Image: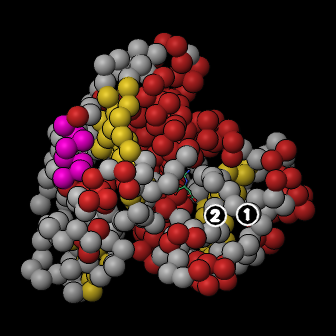
């Protein structure tokens, strides 16, 4: 069953064709060259930001993006001071805000939550991070950084290092970069923080080569891009499990000596201890530039979504299966029990349409 949308929601970048991403990258480039030409482009429009989880860059870059386009903003960044604290569900909160705003941006700790909101939203909604699942606008930021700094999105050897299990930026970036030819992926993590199986399946299905290694020291020499990530403390079941992983990878000046002269270091930020401060002065460290690119690409995205430029993606492509439930305890369908359940695939193992995890029937 396909349910088409009136709006261009952005839940998962891969819902849209690569040509649409390229349009965003081109527009972001133009905006960066001449921001004043866009200073009234969203005059009279209101953006609602619903941040159920902490954020600095994503929230402020969305807000500044809208303000720089001439629009205004409403929203909350502390659910404790909104009706969420009284027990309001996602459906009610987002349906109400979508009646007040022209575009919504939502971050939530649970996988699939933004898709759940999109089912009943009355304006476009953008996923600013749903639990450990996806973070498409960080990926747009990463694509813009690669495009501007490496001048290509193809034939790159990309090392992803750190918490590959819980890092949503990693998941979104791998899905996106596996759409471009010739990219190779080096997955650098401890056994405990390895990339989830469903993500490895996506990589295998795309035909791209990837390998899993535990040593950053050994891997660094062959990389064109090193994407460092923080160990996602808030997604661990216990503090002990987090402490066992903390500090497992630290990029320092000594390791950078072994890297290619044109390798670039990216990080979605915030950094904890995984990149030593001494690396900041290395011209290959691009993570602060990356955060700035994020503002331009979000301006391009807001503009494109509000202009309804492009074909809205189908929100639901799967079907309901009697008695089937998603087996992922971190999926929104196991928290907000009124949600209709949809699955794709056939046979004994199907995929939950909200969180992408596999469920055994
Ligand atoms: C990332 C996130 O929230 O997933 N931060 C961001 O949006 N720039 C990465 C992180 O928190 O580690």
Q: Is residue 237 magenta?
A: no
Q: Is residue 24 visible?
A: no
Q: Residue at x 63, y 54 (%)?
A: 270
**Residue 57 % position (x, y):** 56, 44
C-beta proximity under 8 Å, tags 1 and 2: yes
In the picture, which quadrant includes the N terminus? bottom left
**Residue 230 % position (x, y):** 64, 64
**Vertical comparison of 37 with 104: above or below:** above
> What's the magenta region?
92-99
In the picture, which quadrant includes the C terminus? bottom left
Disc 1 on helix, strand or loop? Answer: loop
Q: Earlier in the sequence, mark 1 or mark 2?
A: 2
- Left or right: where 301 falls relative to 250: left
**Vertical comparison of 239 with 199: above or below:** below
Q: Residues within 10 Å of mark 1 (few under 14, many from 20)?
A: many
On residue 230, the disc is 2
Q: Is mark 2 within 8 Å of ligand 1?
A: yes
Q: Residues within 10 Å of mark 2 (few under 14, many from 20)?
A: many
**Vertical comparison of 197 with 87: above or below:** below
């Amino acid at each position: 069953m396909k349910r088409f949308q009136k709006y261009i929601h952005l839940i998962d970048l891969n819902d849209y064709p690569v040509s649409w991403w390229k349009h965003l990258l081109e527009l972001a480039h133009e905006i960066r060259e001449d921001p004043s030409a866009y200073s009234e482009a969203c005059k009279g429009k209101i953006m609602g930001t619903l941040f159920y989880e902490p954020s600095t860059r994503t929230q402020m870059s969305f807000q500044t993006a809208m303000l720089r386009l001439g629009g205004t903003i409403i929203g909350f960044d502390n659910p404790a001071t909104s009706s969420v604290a009284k027990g309001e569900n996602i459906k009610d909160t987002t349906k109400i805000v979508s009646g007040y705003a022209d575009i919504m941006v939502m971050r939530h700790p649970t996988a699939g939550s933004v898709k759940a909101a999109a089912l009943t939203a009355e304006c476009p909604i953008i996923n600013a991070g749903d639990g450990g699942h996806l973070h498409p606008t960080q990926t747009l930021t990463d694509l813009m950084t690669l495009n501007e700094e490496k001048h290509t999105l193809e034939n790159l050897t990309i090392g992803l290092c750190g918490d590959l299990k819980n890092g949503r930026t990693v998941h979104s970036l791998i899905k996106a970069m596996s759409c471009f030819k010739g990219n190779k992926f080096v997955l650098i993590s401890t056994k405990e923080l390895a990339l989830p199986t469903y993500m490895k399946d996506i990589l295998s299905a795309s035909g791209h080569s990837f390998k899993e290694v535990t040593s950053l020291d050994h891997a660094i020499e062959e990389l064109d891009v090193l994407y460092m990530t923080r160990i996602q403390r808030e997604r661990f079941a216990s503090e002990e499990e987090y402490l066992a992983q903390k500090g497992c990878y630290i990029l320092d000046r000594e390791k950078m000596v072994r890297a290619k002269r044109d390798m670039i270091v990216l990080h979605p930020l915030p950094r904890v201890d995984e990149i030593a401060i001494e690396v900041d002065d290395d011209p290959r460290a691009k993570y602060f530039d990356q955060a700035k690119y994020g503002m331009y690409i979000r301006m391009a995205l807001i503009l494109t979504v509000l202009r309804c430029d492009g074909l809205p993606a189908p929100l639901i492509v799967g079907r309901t299966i009697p008695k089937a439930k998603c087996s992922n305890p971190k999926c929104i369908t196991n928290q907000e029990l009124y949600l209709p359940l949809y699955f794709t695939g056939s046979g004994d193992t199907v995929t939950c349409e909200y969180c992408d995890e596999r469920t055994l029937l």
